[in-house]
Image (cartoon, rainbow, N blue to C red):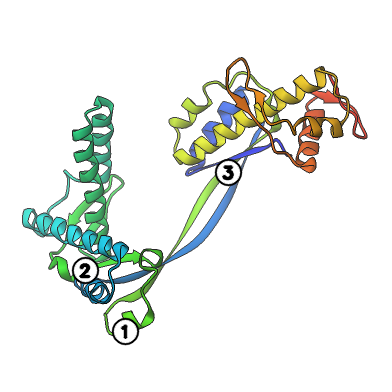
Amino acid sequence: MTLEEKITFYSRENAAEFQKYLKEKDCSARISVEHLFSGTPYFEGTIAAFATLIDTIIAKEEDSELSEIKADLLSREKTLTEFFAEHKVGDVLTDATPSQLLAQLETIEANGNEDIQKTATEKFVNSLMILGTLEDNELLNVAGETPEYTLTGIKDPKEMRVMYAYTDLAGITPEDLDGSGITSHIRTSSTTGYVITTGPEIMLTSGIDDLGDVLEHLDVDDDEAGRFVDAIFFKQALIAKIHELIVGGITTEDALLKAFDAPAFPLGDTTDVISFDLTADYLSGVLNDLRKQGFIKGRDGKIKSC
């Protein structure tokens, strides 16, 4: 159905909880499982190898993007050097796990001090970089549900292997890489999504003002949640305008489509406006869904409010 909307969750439990919420609002919702498999190509090499390669290229021709990567390499090396100076093999990294630092960051953000927020954010990003680099270099043991991170080895930061996406080093040629010690590493991964498909009746209910708050407490990507809430709002605005135009005297699909050619319409009782760029097929699909919901009636291109 045209008015159906989808949202993907990371776990079946959260999808089921959202499905329950929708059903309590008399909105139908079904769950389907979606498996995705994707890959991203990276360049992989030691910090020293990347630094040497970039220095060689920049010596021939200045490149601001490569200079930024060189600065990132030096920052990684400095951060890793400081980390190894403060830790020994066997240490359990209890004070710098992503979950702990993220919790600290969220607490600090709530307090609103920008300088402290910036420091906490940098610490969080550095923690992710350190743990990721240690794991890629097999210097970290991760165990347990919490999980627990144990340092299993120490290495010269210059000799630690790091990766950059192909797109980060788009200007590098095969000739540049020859003899550099830098190779390709294609990382593939599979993910499982639990997709909720809502019925069109969600567009007609007035009891979902708390939709955004509900999603905020579930395990769903922020952008995905935002896209879903926006889609519901936009479709509700479209349906409201369809109702208004039909009540105003429009009786055919063709006339309704032509009416939507207007530059913009007032958005509710606000001073804001909304515009619609609709295809005939899309509008027809919306109207068919509204007929099935008993919102409008009429056949063969005719429309009438119920």
Q: CA distance from mark 2 to mark 3?
A: 41 Å
Q: Nearer the viewer, residue 248 or 12?
A: 248
Q: Secondary structure at mark 2?
A: helix
Determine contact: label 2, label 1, CB under 8 Å.
Answer: no
In terms of image quadrants, where is residue 45?
A: bottom left
Q: Which residue is mark 3?
A: 195
Residue 202 in sight in this render: no
Q: Give the number of the disc on residue 178.
A: 1
- Give whichever of discs 2 and 1 has the lower sequence position: 2
Q: Secondary structure at mark 3?
A: strand
At label 3, the amino acid type is: Val
Which amino acid, mark 1? Asp
The amino acid marked with disc number 2 is Ile
Residue 137: % across, % down: 24, 66
- To which residue does mark 2 refer? 47
Q: Residue at x 15, y 51 (%)?
A: 92
